[in-house]
Image (tube, rainbow, N blue to C red):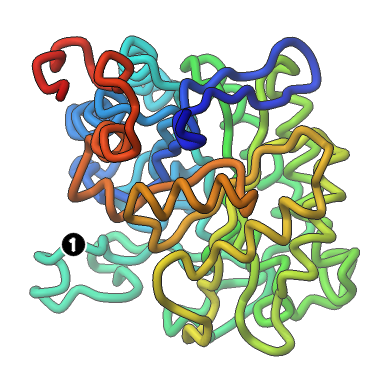
Amino acid sequence: MSKLFEPVSLWAPQGPGLHLRNRTVLAPMCQYSVNAKDGVPHAWHLAHLGARAGGGFGLVFTEATAVSPEGRISDQDTGIWNDAQAGAWVGIVDFLHSQGAAAGIQLAHAGGKASTYAWLPEQASSGHRGSITAEHGGWETLGPSETTIFGLDTPRAMSVGEIHASVRDWVDAAKRAEAAGFDIIQIHAAHGYLIHQFLSPLTNKRDDAYGGSYENRTRYAREVVAAVREAWPAHKPLGIRFSGDDWVDGGWRIEDTVRFATEIRDLGVSAFDLSSAGIGAYHGPSGPGFQVPLATAVRTALEGTGSFVTAVGAITEPAQAEQILVTHQADGVSIGRAELIQPNWPVVAAAALGVHRDELPRAAQYWRAAW
């Protein structure tokens, strides 16, 4: 049997947890398609995510979905800060379930990297890059500290009151995610967005209880995790995506990630996805599977805890994904850019790895594609 297509259950504090038909995960990939700029997902999101569910993924994650209006990366991102948005997610979640996939939502706040023009060709060709101007509807961004490291408009340092209010935004979003029927939440703590900005000494220059020491820099993240875990049903797993390493001396390093992962495992997090970087210029490695060692480090530290650790980044080939799992470098693989080209990536991978044609994880309507 292919390890990649071996079912797995994700741990939750109570109940059986979440059963996945295989170990392929659709990584969150921003679509920048909310043309109404109201955060409400629509037909594009149903078509995009639904195709990947029909294409065989075991777990399908939404794009980074903002917990508050000011937390959007761009004004064309999805959100879940109001009931209209939550209601629009219901039909999408139902369709993912109808195709045999589990439905996950990545909750996010972009912090100092918010209010940027959508990363689409037409935006770039028109010269719209970086921070959205006030003329085009840009908004004030917030972060742990003022910083120019992103090359964007300087965010305003959050007050302690605003930090506490932000934690409540995450909780409210988690409750709406439950109402929409999602099976798992992934807290976005990667890629230089708000939680990562608090974690990294490169962007957190505070001198209060939320800055300075490791304990203080991780406080906001711990408060978000603990509050979301309490609000999220105990029979559903909770996940997190880390930038495992800033790849910069003096930044957030893999040793910090391993330490923090073990700490929040005790808070009820059981799914860990390991990406990297996002703060300042990139100084890390590249090439196929370049981030896999980060996943391996966390998996090794969490051995025996029932955690599900996924590797992500330049994983494109079925044999490559299978090798990552059979050598115990990770428990699953997150596929991002490869699925933008091939929405049926799991079906193709299953065939390549010798899965019997009657067991290919495809939509029933595509049965004639078996070979």
Relative to 107, residue 20 above or below: above
Question: Residue 101, percent across and down?
Answer: 40, 21
Direction from residue 75 to residue 279 in the image, left or right = right
Q: What crowding class fits label 1: few (fewer than 14 Cα within 10 Å), some (14-19), or many (20 or more)?
A: few
Give the residue displayed 9% in from the left and 65% down from the top: 122
Percent from the top left, x then y, of residue 278? 51, 72
Judge left or right: residue 19 versus residue 28.
Answer: right
Left or right placement of residue 126 versus residue 105 in this view: left
Q: Is 368 on the left or on the right of 351, as rendered? A: left
Instruction: Say whether residue 68 is visible.
Output: no
**Residue picked out by circle 1:** 120
The quarter of the picture where the C terminus appears is: top left
Q: Is residue 302 above or below residue 267?
A: below
Examine the image and state in which quarter residue 211 appears.
Answer: bottom right
- Looking at numbered disc 1 in the image, what kind of residue is underneath it? Leu
For the question of whether residue 340 can be seen, the reply is yes
Q: Nearer the viewer, residue 299 or 189?
A: 299
- Helix, strand or loop status at disc 1: loop
| Residue 149: % across, % down | 53, 85
From the top left corner, tell me how far across and down residue 173 is, in percent: 57, 32
Relative to 198, say whether 328 is above or below: above
| Foreground pick, 89 / 284 | 284
* Residue pictured at 39% horizontal, 40% vertical: 26
